[in-house]
Image: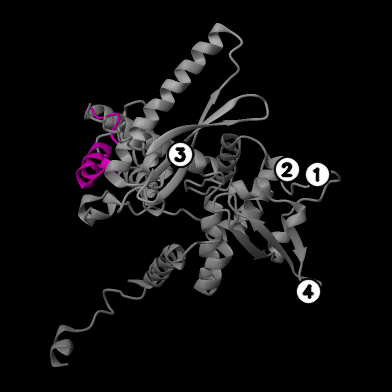
C-alpha cells in the first residue's frame, strides 16, 4: 500500500489574534508575517461576554468584520508587502473625508478660518455631486480635477443665489483645498499637490482691494467729535494708534500690558487671535490716552467692547457721519490707518511690518504704495496753480530756444 503523502500546510501571512483585557472583553488584532518581517495591527474590535443573544450576535458580526479586514490585508501584502497600514488606509479615504479631517484637526484656527475651510469643503462636495463622483478618493485627485473645480468656482453663486462669487473668493476657496492637499503630501498620502500643476493663468486672480483709511486731519476731527458710545470711540482710536484688530481688542488683557526696563515705556505683548503669533507693540502717549481705567475684578482692557460687531459698525457709521467723513469706514480701517499713518510719518517699513504682526514685509508694502500715491496726489495739487494765460511762454521765444 502506497504511503500517503504528507500535506504541506501553507502558513497564512495574516492571522487574527486575541488579547484578553482586564474587564473581560477580548481585543482582536492582526498578526502579519511576510518575507521575514512581522507586524501587528490593532483593529479596535472587541468580543464581549456572551451573556445575552444580542451579545452573541454582536460578537458574530465583529468576527465577520475582522475576517473581512484580514482578507483585505492579505491582498494588500501580496500587492505592496508589509506597509504603514495607517497611511494605506488614509490614502484610500475620499477627498471629502480628508477635507473634513483637515477642517477639524486644526485646533488653533480662528473661527473665521474654520468657516472659510468648511465653506471650501462644501464647494468641493457640490462640485463632486455635479460630476457624479461624490466618493472620489484623495489619491485620485489630479490636474484635471483641479481645473474642473476652478471652473466650477467661477460659476458658484452666493447671497442666496443672487450673485456669482468674486475671483478673490474663488481664489481663497481654491487655496483652502490646495492647503489640504499640501498636508496630504506632507503626511505621505499623495506624492505631489495637483494644484501646483496649474498654470498661473488657470487660477482665479485676486483683485486689488481698496484699503480705506483715515488721514491725520480726519483723526483730529474724530478725536474732537463726541461718539454716543464712549468705549467704541476709545477702542477705535486705540486701534488707530496700535494697529490691533477688533478680535485682539476684545481679547486684550491688562496682564498683557508691561512696563519696559526704562521704567517708563509701556508696551503690549499679545498673541494675535487671527495668526496665533505674538506681537509686541510699544504704547505711545496718544494710545495710552484712549485706554480706559482698569476696573477691579476685570482683566479685559476693553471689556465693554464685547457687543455684537454689527452694533459697533452702526456706531462707527453714525460717528463718521457726525464728523462729515464721507468714507466707508469699518472697524478694520483702524488697522489700515495705523499702518499708513506710521509710514506717512517716515517710519521704517520693516519696523511697521513687525508692529502690525505681518507674516511678510510684502503685506506691509501695500500700505507703502498707498502712501507713495498720496505723495504724488499731494505734489500734484500745485499743478496749474501758478500757470495763467499771461504766463505762458511766447511761441517765438520757445522756437528760438
For disc 4, the neighbor class at 10 Å (few under 14, some 14 to 19, many from 20) is few
Query: The residue tagged with tag 1: helix, strand or loop?
Result: loop
Instruction: Give the x, y percent position of residue 220.
Output: 61, 58
Residue that carries the numbered disc 4 in the rendered image: 261
Q: Secondary structure at mark 2?
A: helix
Task: Specify which label sits upstream in the sequence, 2 or 1.
Answer: 1
Q: Position of residue 384 (x, y in %)?
A: 32, 71
Mark 1 / mark 4, whichever is N-terminal: 4
Residue 336 picture location, percent across and down: 51, 57
Whether residue 72 can be seen here: yes
Tell us which disc is closer to us: 3 or 4.
Answer: 3
Tell me the CA gap for discs 4 and 2: 28 Å
Element type at marker 3? strand
The residue under label 2 is 303
**Residue at the spot of label 1:** 298
Residue 66 lies, with reference to residue 105, above or below; the image says: above
CA separation, marks 2 and 1? 8 Å
Amino acid at each position: 500500500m502506497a504511503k500517503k503523502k504528507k500535506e504541506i500546510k501553507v502558513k497564512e501571512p495574516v492571522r487574527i489574534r486575541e488579547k484578553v483585557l482586564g474587564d473581560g472583553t477580548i481585543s482582536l488584532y492582526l498578526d502579519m508575517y511576510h518575507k521575514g518581517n512581522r507586524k501587528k495591527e490593532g483593529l479596535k474590535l472587541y468580543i464581549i461576554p456572551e451573556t445575552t443573544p444580542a451579545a452573541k450576535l454582536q460578537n458574530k458580526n465583529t468576527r465577520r468584520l475582522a475576517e473581512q479586514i484580514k482578507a483585505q490585508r492579505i491582498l494588500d501584502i501580496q500587492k505592496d508587502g508589509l506597509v504603514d497600514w495607517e497611511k494605506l488606509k488614509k490614502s484610500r479615504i475620499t477627498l471629502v473625508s480628508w477635507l473634513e479631517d483637515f477642517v477639524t484637526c486644526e485646533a488653533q484656527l480662528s473661527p473665521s478660518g474654520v468657516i472659510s475651510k468648511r465653506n471650501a469643503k462644501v464647494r468641493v462636495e457640490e462640485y463632486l455631486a455635479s460630476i457624479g463622483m461624490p466618493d472620489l478618493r484623495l489619491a485620485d485627485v489630479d490636474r484635471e480635477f483641479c481645473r474642473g473645480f476652478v471652473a466650477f468656482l467661477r460659476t458658484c453663486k452666493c447671497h442666496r443665489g443672487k450673485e456669482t462669487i468674486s475671483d478673490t473668493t474663488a481664489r481663497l476657496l481654491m487655496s483652502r483645498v490646495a492647503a489640504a492637499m499640501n498636508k496630504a503630501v506632507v503626511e505621505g498620502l499623495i506624492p505631489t499637490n495637483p494644484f501646483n500643476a496649474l498654470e498661473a493663468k488657470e487660477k482665479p486672480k485676486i483683485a486689488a482691494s481698496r484699503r480705506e483709511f483715515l488721514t491725520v486731519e480726519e483723526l483730529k476731527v474724530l478725536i474732537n467729535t463726541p461718539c454716543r458710545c464712549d468705549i467704541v470711540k476709545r477702542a477705535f482710536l486705540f486701534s488707530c494708534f496700535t494697529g490691533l484688530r477688533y478680535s485682539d481688542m476684545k481679547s486684550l488683557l491688562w496682564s498683557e500690558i508691561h512696563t519696559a526696563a526704562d521704567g517708563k515705556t509701556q508696551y503690549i505683548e499679545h498673541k494675535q487671535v487671527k495668526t496665533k503669533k505674538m506681537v509686541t507693540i510699544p504704547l505711545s502717549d496718544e494710545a495710552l490716552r484712549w485706554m480706559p481705567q482698569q476696573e477691579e475684578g476685570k482683566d479685559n482692557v476693553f471689556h465693554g467692547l464685547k457687543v455684537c460687531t454689527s452694533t459697533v459698525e452702526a456706531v462707527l457709521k453714525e460717528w463718521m457721519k457726525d464728523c462729515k467723513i464721507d468714507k466707508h469706514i469699518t472697524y478694520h480701517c483702524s488697522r489700515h490707518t495705523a499702518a499708513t499713518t506710521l509710514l506717512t510719518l517716515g517710519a521704517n517699513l520693516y519696523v511697521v511690518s513687525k508692529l502690525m504682526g505681518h507674516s511678510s514685509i510684502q503685506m506691509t508694502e501695500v500700505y507703502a504704495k498707498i502712501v507713495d500715491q498720496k505723495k504724488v496726489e499731494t505734489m500734484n495739487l500745485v499743478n496749474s496753480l501758478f500757470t495763467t494765460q499771461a504766463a505762458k511762454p511766447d511761441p517765438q521765444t520757445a522756437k528760438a530756444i
